[in-house]
Image: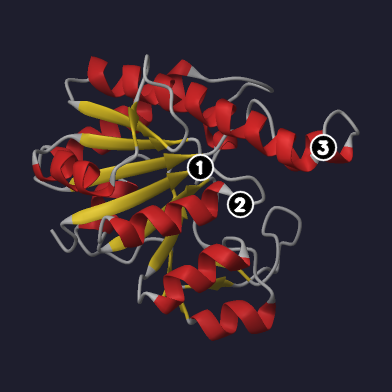
Amino acid sequence: MSYKRILLKLSGESLLGSQDYGIDPVILKQYAEEVKTIVDMGVEVAIVIGGGNIFRGVQGAQGGVVDRATGDYMGMLATMMNAMAIQGSFEKEGMITRLLSAIKMEQISEPFIRRRAIRHLEKGRVVIFGAGTGNPYFTTDTAASLRAVEIEADLVIKGTRVDGIYDKDPEKHSDAKRFDTISYKQVYDLGLSVMDMTAITLCQENNKSIVVFDMNTKGNLLKLIKGESIGTLVK
């Protein structure tokens, strides 16, 4: 394996599958099978999940439903719902998991403690981080970068529905160019929406590489972990 410990970032929208809202059990099972393959090979896996399939704080604030801070806290609760779904799906596939929350929810999760998270990983448990950073105004992209730095992950992997980073939206432009490798400077200069700028800066300052790849293609995660050129590498 090219990487011993990874941080896998999944968007809430990735759990939609063919649905317009909520969680698709077919996608959950597929993700569980993909992750189990690399866990069985000795890779330590931590996961950060978004909540956009249920509620997005920015949209709630823009729609006038709530203020931004309250909306972000609602979004954090949405990530916990997704995290619990992932935990249940993974355990059905035979993996041992631990759910750690940035907001205290003692009945359903452990509080986030860095050393505890690392110890779980060392014991071969899949660690799922919920509730983002626990603070409003920060995205789950930033939470992924922060947790990756804290647990000393070898790589940040962002699973999406596209096969890498393009110079423009490939779903709207047929002439979009895909990058195999790109520098942090290019990401800044071209204004590419890989992750939000806080997350990108955090990875850059701590020398954490990022791979953006298509998580929905079976076998891609294993190929990536083995060192094959899958997706786009930001370094």
Element type at marker 2? loop
Element type at marker 3? loop
How many residues crowd around disc 2 within 10 Å: few (fewer than 14), some, or many (20 or more)? some
The answer to which of 131 and 93 lies nearer the viewer is: 131
Element type at marker 1? loop
The answer to which of 166 and 200 lies nearer the viewer is: 200
Residue located 27% across and 37% down the image: 127
Residue located 18% across and 47% down the image: 44
Residue located 58% across and 45% down the image: 135
Mark found first going from the N terminus, 2 or 1:
1
Taking the image as shown, residue 25 lies to the left or right of residue 148, namely: right
Taking the image as shown, residue 126 lies to the left or right of residue 78, namely: left
Residue located 58% across and 66% down the image: 198
Kindly report the distance in space between the C-alpha atoms of the residues bearing marks 2 and 3. Answer: 15 Å
Amino acid type of the residue tagged 3 in the rendering: Asp
| Proximity of marks 2 and 3: CB atoms separated by less than 8 Å | no
Tell me which corner region of the image, top left, top right, bottom left or bottom right, holds residue 26: top left
| Proximity of marks 2 and 1: CB atoms separated by less than 8 Å | yes
Q: Mark 1 — residue?
A: 132
Mark found first going from the N terminus, 1 or 3:
3
Taking the image as shown, residue 32 lies to the left or right of residue 36, namely: right
Where, quadrant-wise, is the N terminus in this rendering?
bottom left
Q: Mark 3 — residue?
A: 67
Mark 1 or 3: in front is: 3
